Amino acid sequence: MINDPEAEAIFRQEADALTESLQSGLLTLKAAPEDAAVVAQVFRDLHTLKGTGAMFGFGRMAEFIHDFETAFEAVRDGRASVDDDLIRVSLRAHDIIIDMLAGDDPDPAVEAEVLAALHRVQDPTGAPAPMAATPAPEDAGEGLRVSFTLPEDLLDIGGNPAALIAELTALGEGDPALSVCFEDLPPLAEVDPARLYLRWQVTLTGDVSAQDVEDVFLFHSDRMDLRIEPLGTPKAAPATPTPNVVQKPAARGTQKTPQTRVEDHIRVPATRLDGIMDQVGEMVIAEARLSALAAATGDEALADVAETITRLTAGLRDQAMALRMTPLSTITGRFHRLAHDLAESTGKPFDLRIVGEETELDKSLIEKLAEPLMHILRNAVDHGLETPEGRAAAGKPARGLVVIEARHSGADILIGISDDGRGLNPDMIRERAIENGLISPTDQLSRDHLLSLILEPGFSTATQVTELSGRGIGTDVVNTMVRSMRGQVIIDTEEGQGTRFILRLPLTLAIVDGLLVQVGPERYVIPLAAVSAILDMPVGLDFGDSVAKVLPVRGELVSVLSLRRTFGIDAPPAEHPKMILVQSGEGHVGISVDRIIRVEQTVVKQLSPLHREVHAFGGASVQPDGQIALILDVAALGHMHGRRAIRPSVEVPA
Amino acid sequence: MSAVMSQFGATPQDHMVFSVVGSLFALRLNSVREVLRPMPVTRVPMANPCTAGLINVRGTVVPLVDPRPLWGAEITPDTDDTRILIVDVPRRGGEVIVAGIRVDLVRTVLPVLGVEVRPAPHMGLDWPTGIVSGVVGWGDEFVYLLDLAGLFTGHLGLSSEAGGG
């Protein structure tokens, strides 16, 4: 057993990736039970988990996986087939593995039940294994010539070339002609003993079909070059070639393909990436100072260097950002699993389609996104989709459809979750909001505003709390989480046609262009992306005891927050305060500050978990003079005060 | 008690002794990263008064904890003796949170043997329960061993789960 925290951390990361891959493999098999490549993948994941698990002291888990693996070995070898029962029990087994990895002991009864079910797979009572019972004799002829190279890294993944060749040659009658070609063998000094370099040619006589041959290589077919020709056809190569004769440049090419496809990956602790990001951020700031200095002195040589540094810094920044980018596909496995469970528990069959899985965004965002997305998915199925009968009555196909779609839009990423269910009824939302005191019966709200009310705390669209949506987080928490990522939730619905939630998020949280402002002795940063305009506050406006006032701004009634009062800053008001108009939700909110210092690019330092409850800030920025300035979370600020400001009677200063 | 014993064993563990509102507390030396003199503190509006500060420790933004409100005491201005202990707060899963704790005075480094540690009384103390793991006698004074995890998760709103916020 290895007892090294760093190695164990790597094991845990790998185990997470493997269990995720295992789960997604199982779910793929549910849809395509015959997909041999996926069976092989599942088997490999289990095998690796078992091996490394045992190394790190998860002996009990390794034993459990062994039985799980044996079941899939039976499937791989054609002694058992994939059906819904197997997938169901396998998913439960997967959950048990997760528990074991977390150090929790699974319920022995559940474990025993799952194990028993897995044993039944390996040893079905009586029934012949279906895959073995499906030979494909149509290609039968007098024989085949088979020429192949195996994947170079076959040995790494536990393959056995000798066994494959034995299996292949056993297909023919009598002694098969077997020859080997050294064409691709590198000079001895360069030979890696763990790589496969040889091309094989086998002549099989008798009643052999191409399908039989392909079955032998089932698990490697996508990564090898396999040619099968009937013996009667003109040969591309002599039937019994002497070594060196088979001359196929194309074969060389195809053999190289798997090599080029394998990218080198290095696992790096996320903290190191954060470290790089911090340094790059500091450098961006230093570079700005250098450029300013160069411009001020007018020294051409210095300006030249400054320009080069600017270019290099920008490149470095982009590269560092790219390091943190992770495709959405790293979390979509969980959605497939959830969809599977939801369809079973609600009795609403539906398809989950994910578009744009390759869309990349900041790693820290991806992890935070999983929970809100899963909640929206749960809601869409629970409240959005109708029962099959309801769908039939509405003239819709019996199976529902939920689409998760991700794409980039400028510096933002958009993630939409749409269902083709019953949609939202704005009138019902209105009634409910009045009932819950969110709005008053006389309030005139736009349709968008009305829809956004379902994101408010204390609003629940379902008249009864169901088992599904009762657990986990509420829709208001989805909203809060997305806002904490400087994002926005937009709702679009068509009654009877479905609902779409759109999450708009910034691509990265690491660097932000900000407006540095001052209130009394304190300085704050307002993200520039949110700023619509900078205006003078009306002369003589006194906030008195209130935190916010509603003012007419450019023909719109806007609630304006006094940062001084909101943050309890003890200092006399400035003579000429400014109002910063920021976008918040579908409207504007004004923020009153004493003075604007400058626009700056700043590195966002995450606040410690100790400040989790303080929603007003999205992070902190270290100023060139060493002071810390907090970065406002404009959406959260607007959210905290927007409603409160709209309710009191509207005061318009003359 | 037995949990405390097993942490220490028979070899003495060095502790840093400091005072907060007139009582002596100690932290294991290996959980204290450094001791800093008072420095400019950025106020965090709308935060718990105990955690309403941020300090810049060589480019890293570190939350500053002032435990005085937990003792029912007023926050007082810095004195010549005020120090900031930069500590590692353990969370489940091996993660640590770095935080600063403002203390009135740093006294000494004291080797503590496991056998000397007695359970802390539950009542009659100036501070809330669950933040000390034991007490040792030192001359005619008592030194309370501070339980960082208990202090931060029990009274400063830190969730014990790693990544939980």
Image (cartoon, rainbow, N blue to C red):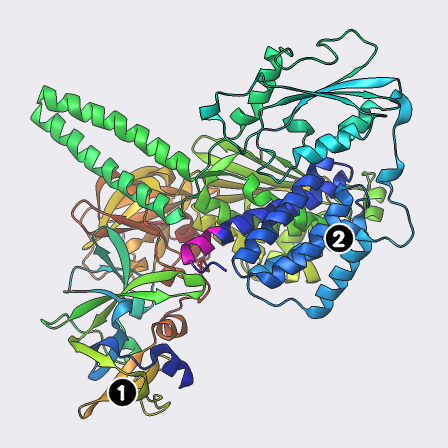
Residue A142 image offset from top left, x and y in percent? 88, 17
Q: Is residue A9 magenta?
A: yes
- Asked if marks 2 and 1 fall on the same chain, the answer is no
User: Between A324 and A630, which is closer to the camera in this rendering?
Assistant: A324
Residue A536 visible, this angle: no
Residue A207 image offset from top left, x and y in percent? 89, 23
Relative side of A551 to A190, left or right = left
Q: CA distance from mark 2 to mark 1?
A: 57 Å
Residue found at x 48% / y 53%: A480
Name above or below for residue A324 compared with residue B23.
above
Residue A138 image offset from top left, x and y in percent? 90, 23
Residue identifier under label 1: B136
- Name the quadrant containing residue B73: bottom left
Name above or below for residue B162 compared with residue A371.
below
Judged from the image, the secondary structure of the residue bearing numbered disc 1 is strand
Relative side of A106 to A372, left or right = right
Which chain is mark 1 on?
B
User: Between A623 and A276, which is closer to the camera in this rendering?
Assistant: A276
Label 2 is placed on what type of residue? Answer: Arg
Residue B142 visible, this angle: yes
Residue range in magenta is A4-10
**Circle 2 residues within 10 Å: few <14, some 14–19, many ≥20:** some
Which chain is mark 2 on?
A
Judged from the image, the secondary structure of the residue bearing numbered disc 2 is helix
- Name the quadrant containing residue B158: bottom left
Residue identifier under label 2: A88
- Name the quadrant containing residue A323: top left
Residue B11 image offset from top left, x and y in percent? 29, 79
Label 1 is placed on what type of residue? Answer: Val
Residue found at x 80% / y 52%: A121
Return the mark for residue A562.
none
